[in-house]
Amino acid sequence: MANSDPSISINLNSIIGRINPFILGQFIEHFPRQIYGGIYEEGSRYSDSDGFRLDVELALKNLAVPLLRWPGGNYTSGYHWKWGAGPKEERISRKNPHWEEFESHHFGTTEFVEYCRRIGAEPLICVGVGRSEENPTPEEAAAWVRYCNSTNGPEAELRAKAGYPEPLNVRWWGLGNECYGPWQIGYYQKAEDYGEDILKFIKAMKKADSAIKFVAVGTTLFINRKWNKRLLLNNDVAQKIDALSWHHYLQIGYSEERMEHTKATLALRKVEKNLDQVIKLIQDTHKRLGNNKLIQIAIDEWNEYGWEEVDIEKNALPEQYDLAHALYTAGFLNLIIRRAKNISMANYSPAVNTRGLIFADHRGILLRSSYYVYQMYKTCAGGFSISSKVESPKLGGSNALALDVASVKVNDNKIYLFVINRSLENLPCQVIIPDFYVKTSSGTIMTAENLRSYNSFKHPDTIKPGKFDVAVLGKDFSVTFPKHSISVLLLEN
């Protein structure tokens, strides 16, 4: 690593934007062992009489999850809301349209919203949109809105039979999932056709409740370079949606096949460039329309890993999520914070099992390394992202900086610094904050013996945050960030 004098310069007057708490959201799908055997497991010694796993629930409560997306994912494209509506005992078991298992549908809309209330999250329901007879229709989607939000009528009566006479007040609705992909039922080859169809959904759903908000399907340029542009050329679509989705999965790999730390970091740089291109497209659309409404980006699915959908058990390997993955998770959250003006939602995919923050089975729960990243970052919610300039050595001869930083101002007296040291060396760093005299400071840090350290049921606390002893004063001070670590500094004046 080339020599350089690391420094972080904070500009309190350069506010990027308010950090929407939804960027710390989660996602749950009817994929094997996420719902059933994950957050919901009837008859389990870990569950209450309603079937909710209390150990998983407590772990999610401790993250202060602001938003939860459901029921998919791929599952959305073939899901019909009435399958999981009304009294549980009257629901019919059906084969999952995407994966080889049967659904009891005991976890439906009211159970989902109830779970959101239990963990303190806002619900986001994703409606299937597509061009197959197996997809829901706009009127079916509107009926789902009425089931959730109406005070009277047949849908409200059906909801009352499920034990919820009062409206559920679901405000956020997704208009399909990855509708550009052949892995979806009734997928679209042209964004223009998708755009025309979602206008029908928006019209019908808004008629059921005019206050609801919509996330339309967008895509990364790695998958389809023209989809977003062609979709947003439809002025009606651009004016009526609230957010455009963007999904991200990086296949880091298993055990000895894992992507090297430096390579993963460089891949993250490509992600930033891709996101900035989408932001530029949205800004250009905003200028063309000449209105004050800026479409937000909703990264409503993201994970270091893509899911294993053939050999399902591979998703349960505890050693998947080591310290290197935690560093990547923190790096991804940092880049979101640095784009707070444009990114208002991000859902880790999924919350439980598969590749989730939490692993749950008959032994209880295991909190993976990335779970603790979310625990450390929840302090950023609601603050203001502010600009910072970073000078740092490069990582492993690459173009990536060893230090990665996001700065957050909570108020005039409180600043958080989220600092990742990706290098294999301790880095003494000069921190400069003009017009802010630090009187008190504290910190939290997470690191481990090496990048491949991970939590297991035998050793569940191998990677866990601890106190970071910092005692700094003034506008200009030095902090040494330990090798391969994630640090959160609280500075107060």
Image (cartoon, grey):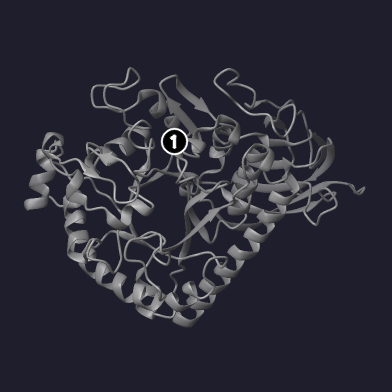
Identified at 43% across, 32% down, the residue is: 60
Quadrant of the rendered image containing residue 239: bottom left
Identified at 27% across, 59% down, the residue is: 211
Q: Residue furthest right?
A: 3
Three-letter code for the amino acid on which mark 1 is drawn: Val
Q: Position of residue 479 (x, y in %)?
A: 80, 35
Quadrant of the rendered image containing residue 475: top right
Observer-nearest of 86 and 281: 86
Circle 1: element type: loop
* Disc 1: CA contacts within 10 A as few (<14), some (14-19) or many (>=20): many
Query: Disc 1 designates what residue?
Result: 352
Height in image: 88 above or below 264? above
Q: How many marks?
A: 1
Height in image: 331 above or below 192? above
Quadrant of the rendered image containing residue 361: top left
Q: Is residue 181 left or right of residue 332?
A: left
Identified at 27% across, 21% down, the residue is: 43
Observer-nearest of 175 and 279: 175
Observer able to see residue 386: yes
Height in image: 222 above or below 231? above
Q: Position of residue 433 (x, y in %)?
A: 76, 47
State the quadrant of the C terminus.
Answer: top right
